[in-house]
Amino acid sequence: MRHVHDRGGWPDAGPVERAEHAYARWEKRTDAMLRFLTRDQRIMRVDELRRAIESLPPKDYETMSYYERWITAIETLIIEKGLLTREDIDHRVETLAATRHV
């Protein structure tokens, strides 16, 4: 059975966009976070990230950008490993959002 991430040979997959683009700050931070967690701290492995990405619901996978998939997978793994809870993450996001509106 093929899954949403299995793109090879799909007639409607279309060409792969290979053009370089300027990365947004959050995309650079996501990349840095992954490097920190995999290489520096060895908290997670790239194969775990892949599993988390491939486990996304098809609708989510289809509508997310490349780095949105990454950050969602990182969040999933951080919670699975007990490093943070969903509540910890939500609280921090709320705190950051509140400080930006001041």
Image (cartoon, grey):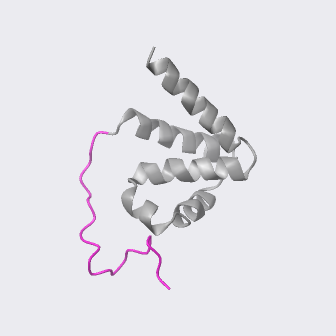
Query: Magenta segment: does it hold 51?
Result: no
Would residue 39 appear left or right of 11 to someone viewing this image?
Answer: right
Expressed as whole percent of the image width and height from the top left, the position of residue 44 reads 67, 51
Magenta run includes residue 4: yes
Q: Residue furthest bottom?
A: 1
Q: Residue at x 42, y 40 (%)?
A: 27
Looking at the rendering, the stretch of residues picked out in magenta corresponds to: 1-22
Where is 34 relative to 16, above or below?
A: above
State the image coordinates of residue 98 (x, y, percent, origin top left): 51, 22
Instruction: Check the image and report above or below for 97 versus 56.
Output: above
Identify which residue, 30 or 79, lies in the foreground.
79
Q: Quadrant of the C terminus?
A: top left
The overriding secondary structure of the stretch rendered in magenta is loop
Residue at image position (52%, 63%) is 56
Residue in view at x 45 percent, y 20 percent: 100
Seen as rendered, the residue at the extreme top is: 102
